[in-house]
Image: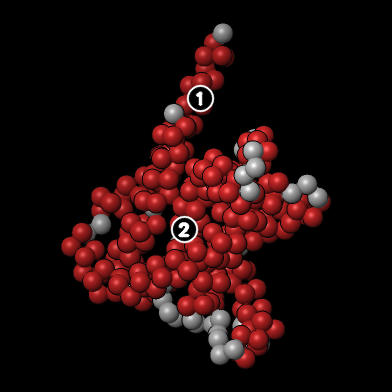
Amino acid sequence: MLKIRFAPSVALLAGWLTTAFLILPFVALLLHISWSDVWSVWAASGGSPLVTSLWSTAISMVSIILFGTPLGWFLARGKSRVWKWLEVLLLIPLLMPPLVIGLLLVYFYGPYGGMGHLLSQMGLSATNTVLAVVLAQLYESIPYYVFAAQASFSQIDEKYERVSLSLGVSPWRTMVRVIFPLARPGLIVGFAMAFARAIGAFGAVIVVAYYPNTLPVSIWIALEEQGLPSALPLALLLLVVALPMPLAAVLWRRVKAD
């Protein structure tokens, strides 16, 4: 009986210790950062990187929705082995170190790669451009949305779709009026997670696009050239931009579930 009572206490202690391990560094940042320095750093060096990050992330998220949503649907409903193997392949960029992703993108989209040569023929460049930033953000973030979409679509009972089709509703209207509303909570959470991943992308971005500076790259430059006091305000700016959407999405889904 004592062992049964002891186990929940150990689990509770482990849970609190894990939470403290994850949250306390953020609390320390908020308590010890100089807020007067924050505003001065943001005004001096935070504007342009923030605009670049938001602009490139907006392009990335539109692309993710347009291409990731159908892919998530087919992964959820595809019955052939092709979709099963495709699901395994999509795990590769999700598990790959970001720095390696950047090297692969440079090799493929860089000036000496096959796709890079094709882009140059069209007057485009995937090195040190917004296009390079978008490609890196897409590669790092799209699996998060695709797998969230797959999970959302998989949880929908196919009988709703069959009933709608049996009533003469077209497949497209069935998707818009039945499937998407049911999958919306999971899609929103997936979108928010992909957004946070894209705007915070660093490893791949710094390889393919040192310029124009995004916020994560600017944080690294500030840390290297000016030290921690200049890097922390930019890091806080990135958190202010990246965290609210995922936190709100998760909270909204929990409220809807209750």
Quadrant of the image occupied by residue 17:
top left
| Residue nearer the viewer, 248 or 204 | 248
Q: Alpha-carbon neighbours of circle 2 within 10 Å: few (<14), some, or many (≥20)?
A: many
Q: CA distance from mark 2 to mark 1?
A: 36 Å
Residue located at (63% from left, 80% from top): 109
Q: Return the x and y of residue 243 as percentages of the image width and height.
A: 39, 52
Residue visible at 62% across and 74% down? 105
The answer to whether residue 88 is visible is no
- Residue mark closest to the camera, 2 vs 1: 2
Identity of the amino acid at label 1?
A: Val
Q: Is residue 210 above or below residue 15?
A: below
Residue, disc 1? 10
Q: Which residue is mark 2?
A: 195
Q: Which mark is residue 57?
A: none
Is residue 244 visible from the viewing direction of this image? yes
The extreme right residue here reads 81
Do the residues bearing badges 2 and 1 touch, measured as CB atoms within 8 Å? no
**Image location (x, y in percent) of residue 63:** 54, 65
For image coordinates 62% across by 68% down, the residue present is: 100
Vertical side of 1 occupied by 249: above or below: below
